[in-house]
Image (cartoon, rainbow, N blue to C red):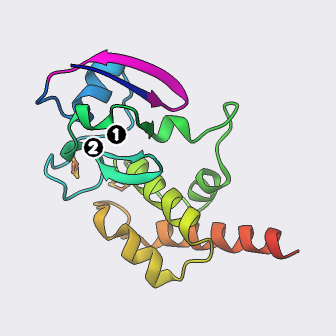
Amino acid sequence: MKINFKLNGQKYSLDVEPYEILLEMLRDRVGVKSPKCGCNRGDCGTCTVLLNGKTVRSCLVLAIEIDGAEITTLEGLMADGKLTPLQESFLAHNSFQCGFCASGMLLSTTELLEENPAPSKEEIKETLSGNLCRCTGYTPIIEAISDQAERRNKIWVS
Ligand code: FES
Ligand code: FES
């Protein structure tokens, strides 16, 4: 079946099998490597992508389901080759060690800050409850997000 979709702002048209999984299609056929396969059953969040602006676990989505949709991966967050302020905040807080969870964390946080520009630490924790990190203990990740939310709100208020 032929599907048409936008990935990180670029149009694609691809023949897919009815059983083809979005995560495999992105990594193996399109060559987008930021979504990772951690558990392949919806538990770890490393395969997270934005589907029309909402996070989904791409290991649980069929490729045919994205016909006509817009997909954003970590590669699509940057503009003009520059990291976003959120990415800079993660770097400044040394939020990652191995980085395997980074793509999913950043996309989940991107969705959160779109919907709730001033999340509490509890709301951040709730949002990231489906994104597992085996390295950091989460503290530097949550601090990076809180810090970025505070900076944004200061800019908006001033
Ligand atoms: S690989 Fe999809 S949630 Fe773990
Ligand atoms: S930094 Fe290694 S899994 Fe999160």
Spatial separation of the CA atoms under disc 2 and disc 1: 8 Å
Left/right placement of residue 102 relative to residue 148 reads left
Q: Which residues are magenta?
A: 6-17
The quadrant the N terminus occupies is top left
Left/right placement of residue 101 relative to residue 118 reads left
Q: Is residue 51 magenta?
A: no
Give above or below for 97 relative to 149: above
Give above or below for 64 relative to 13: below
Closer to us: 108 or 95 = 108
Circle 1 Cα neighbour tier, 10 Å, few/some/many (<14 / 14–19 / ≥20): many
Q: Residue at x 41, y 28 (%)?
A: 5
| Residue 97 showing in the rendered view | no
Q: Residue at x 72, y 67 (%)?
A: 152
Q: Residue at x 67, y 36 (%)?
A: 79
Q: Residue at x 70, y 31 (%)?
A: 80
Q: Secondary structure at mark 1?
A: loop
Amino acid type of the residue that numbered disc 1 sits on in the rendered structure: Pro
- The residue where tag 1 is placed is 35
Q: Is mark 1 within 8 Å of ligand 1?
A: no
- The residue where tag 2 is placed is 58
* Marks 2,1: beta carbons within 8 A: yes
Q: In x, y percent, where is residue 15?
A: 25, 15
The quadrant the C terminus occupies is bottom right
Q: Is mark 2 within 8 Å of ligand 1?
A: yes
Give above or below for 4 relative to 76: above
Q: Is residue 13 magenta?
A: yes
Left/right placement of residue 31 relative to residue 52 reads left
